[in-house]
Amino acid sequence: MNSGKLSLIALMIGSLTLAACSDGGAPAAPTMGPMPVTVLEMQPQKVPTSIEVMAQTEGARETEVRARVGGILLKRLYQEGDVVKAGQPLFQIDRAPYEIALAETRARADQTAREMNRLKGLAEAKAISQKDYDDAVSANAMAQAALRQAELNLSWTTVTAPVSGTSGRAVRSEGNLVSAGSDSLLTSIYQTNPMWVRFSLGESDLAKLPGGRLNEQQISGVELEMANGQIYGQSGKLNFVASNIDTTLGTQALRAEFANPEQQLLPGQFVRVRLLTGERDGIFLVPQSAVIQTEQGTIVMTADGENKVAPRPVKAGEWRGKDWVILSGLQAGDKVIIDNLMKLRPGAPVAPNPPPAAGQPSGKPADAAQK
């Protein structure tokens, strides 16, 4: 017996069973009541207009720490990742060869100084030529310069922090041979207060601005959104706006500056920058989860005057925190349904309830919880 016949038989059996129940006086199955839903009553609001793009943080100053003399690296004198102060010792290079070189140059400098002083009296007495005395003066000057260089070389065996900031990972380990050339990098120091944030605006973003490009006068504020969706507590400001458009990428490069006293921001983080470009009045904020994207456009579900589901086409703008900015399609007093959306059908009755109060379990009306 094929599946079509089985389906027909099952349908006939079901019909007979329902008829038997009706004839026997059994009560019919209860009908479902209105679907309980949570609704937000729309009120027009004034919110800043903004452009939001991805960005990356970087230290306001990233300074390389390099060896200025070569030798064996004997010791690392700091804890990687700690905050260091300018002038703090970070690495120790073997001092012995430079101590020997200093002793030799000092002895030579002392000798040339004595010779110059000896010839000075003879030159005044015209016992020697002026050239002999001038040669002695020159030899002493070169010896004193060599002495100064030897003293510097010895001091440079202790590598210190050129600036204050957060130390990076050590590039070289104890026992490594370091040189003063291109291979001299030992670590880096990052100044993270303030923190800089680099980003670019594409053609679509620039098209939203007057003249199709951005300048500092158009920006009323800069906000930073963290990876967890929270807005960073410190407001920022632009400290660089490129005067040209990158011909390869078609973008305008920008940089913002944020105070970072608590070290919440670390170099290299990916964040979102929000450029505040003005204010827009008479718009509505709807939770992102309540906005539905369809092939015909964007809609929200509302509860009409008869408490029935009424789909409403809307025009959505940008995100604002966890909400969509709705530019048109809603009016003050509209009740937007924000939950149970998958169970709703146009025209279906609903039992609207306001959002639960703070600390109230979601899905339970506030008045029912008080009973």
Image: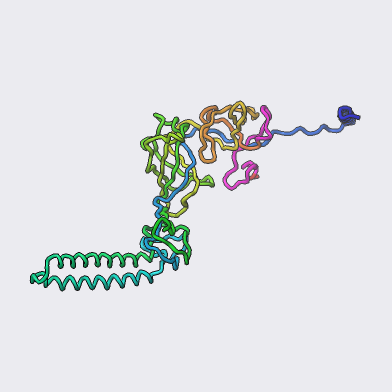
> What secondary structure is the magenta-colored segment mainly?
loop
**Residue range (magenta):** 341-368
Tell me if 173 is positioned left or right of 40 in this view: left
Q: Which of the 4 quarters of the picture holds residue 206?
A: top left
Quick one: quadrant of the C terminus? top right
Whether residue 159 is in magenta: the answer is no
Say above or below: 325 vs 197: above
Q: Identify which residue, 18 or 281, lies in the foreground.
A: 281
Tell me if 346 is positioned left or right of 17 in this view: left
Q: Residue at x 40, y 58 (%)?
A: 66
Whether residue 359 is in magenta: the answer is yes
Residue 319 percent across, percent down from the top left: 52, 37
Q: Residue furthest top?
A: 296
Residue 166 can be seen in this image: no
Say above or below: 35 vs 78: above
Q: Identify which residue, 151 or 6, lies in the foreground.
A: 151
Say above or below: 88 vs 360: below
Tell me if 340 is positioned left or right of 222 in this view: right
Residue 63 can be seen in this image: yes
Q: Residue at x 49, y 41 (%)?
A: 54
Q: Residue furthest left?
A: 125
Residue 64 percent across, percent down from the top left: 40, 55
Residue 185 percent across, percent down from the top left: 42, 57
Q: Residue at x 39, y 57 (%)?
A: 181
Q: Residue furthest right?
A: 1
Residue 37 percent across, percent down from the top left: 64, 36
Q: Residue at x 39, y 54 (%)?
A: 63
Quick one: quadrant of the N terminus? top right
Q: Identify which residue, 197 or 355, lies in the foreground.
A: 197
